[in-house]
Amino acid sequence: MKRHYWYVMITYIAMQLSAFIGVPLLRALGVGQGAETRLEAAQLASGYWAVISFLAAFVIILWLLRGDRDEWEMRRLPLASSWMWAIFGVVLALAAQSIAANIEWRLLGIEPGSENTRQIINIIRLTPLLVIVTSVIGPILEELIFRKIIFGSLYKKYNFWLAALVSSLLFAVVHMELEHLLLYTAMGLTFAFLYAKTGRIFVPIFAHVAMNTFVVAVQLLLADELENMMRQAELPLAVWRFWL
């Protein structure tokens, strides 16, 4: 692995761990004092720190990757074809979510729904700026880390399936919902396929950003209506629930 890739990964890990210091710091500075409950105060501080830490990590990582090129220069698809895969990738990612969620529910007995996604949506309602993180910055960073760096480095030495599986499992573990390991791994495999197919990192980035933006919009604007429709039609909620 290239040396600056290690710096990128250290930056990403530091960003993830920084909340243990940053959130209490914001609370000490008075963030969340006007909240109605202690939970809302903590969520406000968490939301603002996420925006600060993700923005800082985003700038640092982009600087570290300046001038870096995709690994498969000779295997790139033409730009027009890559954009078609990027758009189709959104459908693939949502389909992978739905299939994996139904396997978890029907075969493994895991209840559909994501506590992680639910908490993020609640924090977004209190801290609307967090939408930038969940819809844009977060997906870009995840694709740079898990697809470009981890998957790309492994794919240069090993076959697609080993590289994709290792990077996707790490991607799943980072989301801290081990009960949904299959679901997040399926998403990771989808994004790895898009990268390997096109040789262009913007393809899984676009698919991931579009998917997260869609999920946030649905959860914020249409969640209650869709849930009522599913219940009236006696369809399983796993049919439409999505994850970030």
Image (cartoon, rainbow, N blue to C red):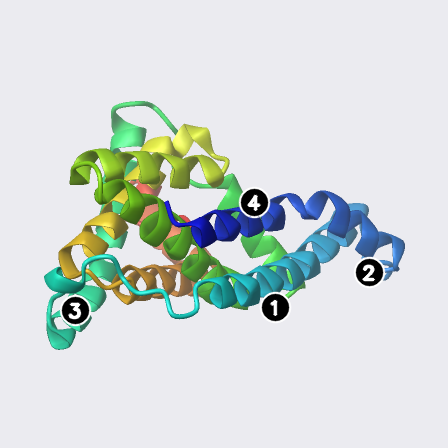
Sequence order check: which comes first, mark 2 or mark 3? 2
Q: Which mark is residue 93?
A: none
Q: Residue at x 19, y 50 (%)?
A: 193
| Residues tagged 1 and 2 counted as in contact (Cβ below 8 A) | no
Q: Which mark is residue 128?
A: 1
Sequence order check: which comes first, mark 3 or mark 4? 4
Relative to 20, 135 lies left or right: left
Sequence order check: which comes first, mark 1 or mark 2? 2
Quick check: can you spot residue 125? yes
| Residues tagged 2 and 4 counted as in contact (Cβ below 8 A) | no
Give the SS element for disc 1: loop
Q: Which sits in the foreground, 125 or 152?
A: 152
Please say if 217 is above or below 122.
below
Relative to 35, 186 lies left or right: left
| Residues tagged 3 and 1 counted as in contact (Cβ below 8 A) | no
Question: In this rendering, which labeled residue sits more in front, label 3 or label 4?
Answer: 4
Q: Give the percent coordinates (x, y) of residue 139.
A: 42, 58
**Kind of residue at disc 2:** Val
Give the SS element for disc 2: loop
Pointer 2 residue: 31
**Kind of residue at disc 1:** Pro
Pointer 4 residue: 13
Q: Residues within 10 Å of mark 2 (few under 14, many from 20)?
A: some
